[in-house]
Image (cartoon, grey):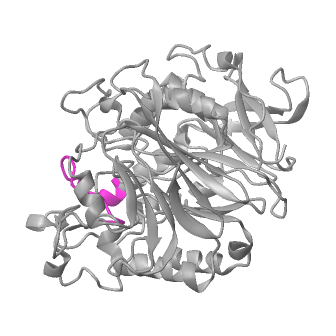
Amino acid sequence: MAGGAGMGLPRGAWTRLRSDTEPFALGVASGSPTHGSVVLWTRLLLPAGQGPATVRWEVAHDDKFSRLVQTGQTQALPGLAHSVHVEVQGLEADRWYFYRFVAGDATSPMGRTRTFPAPEAVVARLRLAYASCQRWEHGYFSAWRHMRDENLDLVTFLGDYIYEYPNASNAVRVPSGGWVLTLDDYRQRYALHKGDVDLQAMHAACPWLVSWDDHEVQNDYAGSTEGNSGQAVADFAARRAAAYQAFYEHMPVPASVLTRAMAGLAEGAEMRIYRRLHYGRLASLTMLDARQYKDAQVCTRDGKKGSSTLNPASCASWNDPARSMLGPQQERWLETELARPVSRDSHWNVLGQQSLFGQRDFKGGPGQVLWNDGWDGYAAARTRLTGALQKHGVANPVLLGGDVHENWVGHVKADYADTASPVVGVEFCGTSITSRSAGNARIPELLAENPHFLFADSERRGYGVVEFTPKQLTTTLRVASDVTQQDSGIETLARFSVQAGRPVIEKS
C-alpha cells in the first residue's frame, strides 16, 4: 500500500447527523500522523454543567469494526470543552485504518485515517491537498465536498480556519454570535464550522496537518501585539490564550501541544504547533508557525497596527536583521532540521507556512510598494531561510502557503532584487476555500513586475492538490464554480509540474 490512498470512506458515514443535542454532532477528525501513530479527535456536545465523560475509542482494519486493532477509554473534560485527543501508538506503518468513538449509548460517525511509511521506506507516491481561509460569510464549503474525491493521503491546512468577525457585506450566510473575543465565543465559532457537513466529511476522510494564521485570534495580530479588528480588549494576552485553547479543543493535534502551555498561556506561554514529519524517503513535511512568534509589523500607515502596503525605502526599520517572522527559537530549530542528512536524502522537502513567500512588488517600474504583514515585511528573515536551504543542500524545497486569497505559483529566489539570482525552490501559494479577494485586475501587470512568478489568479476559490513521486511533482489548482451556491461544481484552473533535481515549474 506504499504511497496509495487506500479504500475510500463510505459516503454514508457522516450523514447520520444529527441534531445539536447529539454528543457527536461536531464529527471526528485525525491528524499529526507518524509511521506508528496518529491523533484521533472529537468533541462531545453535552448539556451545560456536565462533568467529565468517559469516551471509548476503537481503531479497526475494516469499516464494520469486525477486525479491531486497538481500543481504549479516555476522559472528555469540561475544562477543555469535552474535547478528546487520543494519541494511538503502535500502529503499523503505511496503512489505512478506520476509527470511531462511543459515549454512553451514542456512537460517533466513522473516520478513516492512515499512518505514514517508515522513515527509510521507498515510497512511490504521496498525494496531499493544501488549503486555507474559510470565512463563513463569504460562501459555502463545497470545496471540501469535492476534495473528498481527490483520493488524498493528507490535508495540510495553513490557517484561518475561523474568522473573528460578526458579519460581512453581501454575506452568503451569517455566523452566529457577534465579535469573537472570549473562550466561549471562540468555542462557538469553531462549533459552527465543525457542524458543516462538507467540512466534517473531509476531516473524516484522511488525516490533517493543521496550522493557524491571524484570524484564529484577531486580524493582523503579530506575536504578543494585538491586531486591528473590532474593539481593543483590556488584556490581549488573555484573548490570545483563549483563542489558542479553543484551537486545541477543535483540532486533531497532540495533547502535548497544550500540556506545555497550560501553566502560562494567559501570561504569554507558547503553544508549540510547528513540527517536522517524514513520509518515507519520498518527502519531509515541515509545518511552520509564522504568526505566534512574529515581530510586529513596521511602518504601518497612519501609525495603526497591522498591515499596509508601502515603499520600504521610506521605512528605516524595514530591513532590520533582528526582526523575525518565525521567532529566534523556531528559526534555530528549522536550521537544525534542515541541516540533518534527511533534508538531502528526501526526494522532496515541503514547508507549509501561512503566506506568500516570494517578493510581490505592487508598483510597476522603478521603486517598490510591498506588503508589510507577509514575508516581504521580514526580508532579512526570508533571506536567512533561503540561505539555510542553500547552505545545507536541501533537496527540492517546495513551499506551500495561503492567506492572500489568491493563487500564486512561482520560483523561490535567493535574492529577489537580482533577476539572475539562483532559484532555491518552488512555491505554490493557494487561494481560499471561501474568503474573498480584492479581485485584483492588475494580475498581468504584477506578473510582469515580479517575473519569478509565472501564474496568478485572484478570482477563484478552492484548493491545491500536489502529487509527489520520486521523479516529479504535479500541482493541480482546483476551483469551485461559485462558492455562493451550496451545490457548486469544481473545475481545474491550471496544472504544473516540477522535475526532481530541477527547480523549474512547467505549466502542463
Q: Can residue 27 be seen from the camera position used here? A: no
| 233 and 319: which is toward the camera | 319
From the viewer's perspective, is 186 left or right of 42? left
Q: Position of residue 482 (x, y in %)?
A: 36, 26
Magenta stretch containing residue 507, yes or no? no
From the viewer's perspective, is 118 left or right of 164? right
| 16 and 451: which is toward the camera | 451
Quarter-wise, where is residue 71 in the image?
top right
Task: Report the residue at 31% width, 51% height from top.
Answer: 218
Vertical arrangement, residue 449 with respect to residue 83, above or below: below
Quarter-wise, where is residue 355 in the image?
bottom left
Q: Position of residue 51 (x, y in %)?
A: 59, 32
Q: Position of residue 384 (x, y in %)?
A: 46, 82
Residue range of the region highlighted in magenta in the rendering: 221-239
| 77 and 490: which is toward the camera | 490
Vertical arrangement, residue 446 with respect to residue 127, above or below: below
Task: Report the residue at 51% width, 31% height from top.
Answer: 144
From the viewer's perspective, is 345 left or right of 49? right
Q: Position of residue 416 (x, y in %)?
A: 36, 76
From the viewer's perspective, is 366 left or right of 450? left
Count of all numbered marks drawn on residues in the image: 0
Task: Report the residue at 74% width, 50% height from top.
Answer: 125
* Furthest-left residue in this view: 302
- Of the 4 image quadrants, the one containing the N terminus is top right
Secondary structure character of the magenta stretch overall: loop
Vertical arrangement, residue 341 with respect to residue 117, above or below: below
Quarter-wise, where is residue 310 in the image?
bottom left
Q: Can residue 128 be seen from the camera position used here? A: yes
| 412 and 21: which is toward the camera | 412
